[in-house]
Image (cartoon, grey):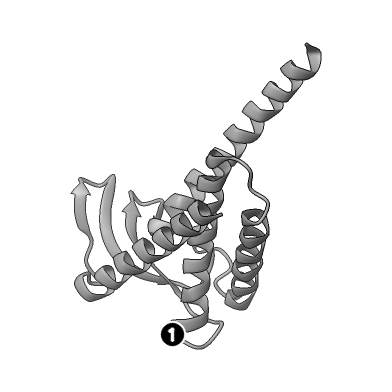
């Protein structure tokens, strides 16, 4: 449990510190290229979800973030392996950081906009928490598959 909580806190702090840096360093009107047009830095405030979907439903994403944090806490109390502890910590920390943005950032309580600043070509702009969410989901799929295959092999013996 301590590993999961520690990783979660680390992910949330890393995400919030990187957002603080972005807000205090980057301009909304300027894109700073890192790898040409493929990767850059550009500050935006996203009221919606991934790809700026649902920009008029910020309060729904606040609820979804709160539920995700609750689910992460529930799993934290039940995790039995180090690999699952790491994954749950990553997902929980990212969800907690997004929930913090939704609750505390302008324009108002529970209507806050997410700070995004990592520009992936012309596809979308994200943040550190988004990287941990995507990586965490991939890890959940891999762990679920490998555990299912292992359990099936053990049952056949």
Residue 125: x, y in percent?
Answer: 38, 58
Residue 108 seen in this snapshot: yes
Q: Residue at 50%, 59% (x, y): give it.
A: 5
Of the 4 image quadrants, the one containing the N terminus is bottom right
SS type, badge 1: loop
Q: Residue at 29%, 72% (x, y): give it.
A: 20
Residue 21: x, y in percent?
Answer: 25, 69
In the orientation shown, which residue stands out farthest toward the bottom? 108
Quarter occupied by residue 73: bottom right
Please determine whether, in this image, residue 129 is positioned above or below residue 47: above
Compare residues 103 and 44 and report the one nearer the observer.
Answer: 103
Please determine whether, in this image, residue 60 is positioned above or below residue 106: above
Of the 4 image quadrants, the one containing the C terminus is top right
Compare residues 6 and 93 and report the one nearer the observer.
Answer: 6
Please determine whether, in this image, residue 131 is positioned above or below residue 99: above
* Residue with the mark numbered 1: 106
Q: Residue at 62%, 27% (x, y): give it.
A: 146
Compare residues 29 and 147 and report the one nearer the observer.
Answer: 147
From the viewer's perspective, tell me whether residue 32 is left or right of residue 14. Answer: left
Please determine whether, in this image, residue 104 is positioned above or below residue 48: below
From the viewer's perspective, tell me whether residue 156 is left or right of residue 129. Answer: right
Rate crowding at label 1 as few (under 14), some (14 to 19) or many (20 or more) other CA atoms within 10 Å.
some
Residue 112: x, y in percent?
Answer: 49, 80
In the orientation shown, which residue stands out farthest toward the top? 157
In the orientation shown, which residue stands out farthest toward the front? 2
Residue 116 seen in this snapshot: no
Number of numbered discs present?
1
Residue 37: x, y in percent?
Answer: 25, 47
């Amino acid at each position: 449990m301590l590993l999961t909580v520690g990783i979660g806190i680390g992910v949330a702090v890393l995400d919030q510190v990187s957002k603080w840096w972005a807000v205090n360093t980057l301009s909304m009107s300027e894109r700073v290229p890192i790898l040409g047009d493929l990767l850059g830095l550009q500050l935006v405030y996203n009221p919606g979800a991934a790809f700026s979907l649902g920009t008029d439903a910020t309060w729904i994403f606040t609820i979804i973030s709160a539920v995700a944090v609750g689910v992460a806490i529930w799993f934290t109390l039940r995790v039995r392996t180090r690999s699952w502890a790491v994954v749950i910590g990553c997902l929980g920390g990212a969800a907690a950081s997004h929930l913090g943005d939704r609750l505390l950032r302008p324009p108002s309580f529970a209507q806050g906009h997410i700070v995004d600043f990592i520009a992936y070509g012309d596809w979308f702009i994200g943040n550190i928490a988004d990287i941990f969410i995507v990586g965490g989901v991939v890890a959940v799929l891999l762990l679920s598959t490998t555990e299912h295959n292992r359990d099936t092999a053990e049952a056949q013996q």
